Amino acid sequence: MSVPVITLDGPSGSGKGTVGRAVAERLGWHFLDSGALYRVLGLAALRHGVALDDEATLATLAQDLDVTFQGERVILEGEDVSGAIRSEEAGAAASKVAALPAVRQALLARQRAFRRLPGLVADGRDMGTVVFPDAPLKVFLEASAEERARRRHAQLKAQGHDVNLDQIVADIRARDRRDRERAVAPLKPAEDAVVIDTTELAPEAVIEEILDLAKARGLAGS
Ligand code: DC
């Protein structure tokens, strides 16, 4: 039997990260934060002075990237960059390099290498459509742009940032458009994905729903 995978795709702020980590933990499975890979690559490009539209060099950089994941810690070339990859700058660089087909291709094998026993929860935008198309359970999380902005706003405020909610709503709408309309691996549910709208749901309810789905498909112990 192949190693089971639960894919968890959706826009930023849909709760994928929180929910995905918790589901992986409850099942005792591995977890892939594919967005972190794109962020590390964006950061590495900035640090090495590689232009964010130099597709061939970026693909080589992606191929050779010296990155390891230790739980929630991300190590790039021996340095802990867990905080640095969450900056706006790294996020913006990630979204640019993620639009390049050769870069996505170069990261495919690296992402698939996370598929190890007893199983994998993979979080991203194209986990169910491109990276693990044979996954036995695919989930797509939705939430209204307003709710996702509210979550992001609360998070930033808790970190001591002074931010404007209307600006965040506008940013989220712009990023959604970019992610959904890009030519390669656009953000969309796989045809066989279960779509869950998390707008009115607490994370725990979403986690339970996914665990129930996993059980119903024989992926999780009882
Ligand atoms: O989920 P995130 O915000 O950490 O993702 C960072 C960027 O990487 C985001 O602009 C979308 C892109 N990304 C992608 O194109 N494909 C993935 N599987 C994951 C992230």
Image (cartoon, rainbow, N blue to C red):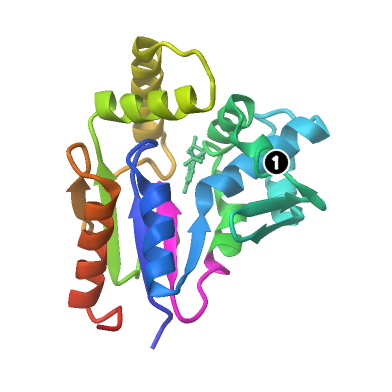
Residue 181 position, x and y percent, is 35, 31
- Residue 113 covered by magenta stretch: yes
- Give the labeled residue for mark 1: 58
- Residue 106 covered by magenta stretch: no
**Residue 127: quadrant of the picture:** bottom left
**Residue 49: quadrant of the picture:** top right
Q: Give the range drawn in magenta.
A: 112-130
Residue drawn at x 34%, y 11% is 166
Q: How many labels does the image show?
A: 1
Q: Is mark 1 on a helix, strand or loop?
A: helix
Q: In which quarter of the image is the C terminus?
A: bottom left
Residue drawn at x 67%, y 29% is 52
Residue 148 lies, with reference to residue 115, above or below; the image says above
Residue drawn at x 40%, y 33% is 179
Q: Residues within 10 Å of mark 1 (few under 14, many from 20)?
A: many
Whether residue 129 is visible, yes or no, is: no
**Residue 86: quadrant of the picture:** top right
